[in-house]
Amino acid sequence: MIATAGQALLPAVADDRVRPLIDTTLAFDTAARAAEQLRSHLAQGKIVLTVP
């Protein structure tokens, strides 16, 4: 069932009809802050770490 849902979802992702909700973008050196935000359950979407 999960594999079937994934196969149905892939075309929507490829066509940009489905995109992730990004809550915060942080520099990689602030990963501890990102982890704390995850533990707090306050993030409303993905937390993205950027690498210089």
Image (cartoon, helix red, strand yellow):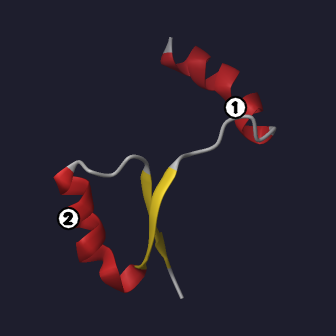
Three-letter code for the amino acid on which mark 1 is drawn = Leu
Q: Image check: 6 left or right of 48?
A: right
Q: Would you call the spot at circle 1 few (<14 residues within 10 Å), some (14-19), or many (20 or more)?
A: few
Q: Residue at x 44, y 52 (%)?
A: 46
Please say if 15 is above or below 24. above
At label 2, which amino acid type do we have? Glu
Relative vertical location of residue 47 with respect to residue 20 in this rendering, above or below? below
Q: Residue at x 68, y 20 (%)?
A: 8
In-front residue for pair 27/7: 27
How crowded pointer 2 is (Cα within 10 Å; few <14, some 14-19, many 20+) is rated as: few
Which percent across, then down, holds residue 11? 77, 30
Residue drawn 23% across the image and 48% down it: 41
Q: How many marks?
A: 2
User: Disc 2 on helix, strand or loop?
Assistant: helix
On the image, the x and y values in percent for residue 16 come to 76, 41
| Structural distance between the alpha carbons of marks 1 and 2 | 31 Å
The answer to the question of whether label 1 and label 2 lie on touching residues, with beta carbons closer than 8 A, is no
Please give left or right for residue 31 compared with residue 21 in the image: left
Instruction: Give the label, 1 or 2, closer to the camera.
Output: 2
If the image is split into quadrants, where does the C terminus sit? bottom right
The image's mark for residue 10 is: 1
Nearest the viewer among 41 and 11 is: 41
**Residue that lies at the very extreme toward the right in this rendered image:** 15
Q: Residue furthest top?
A: 1
- Mark before the other along the chain sequence, 1 or 2: 1
Q: Is residue 45 above or below residue 18?
A: below
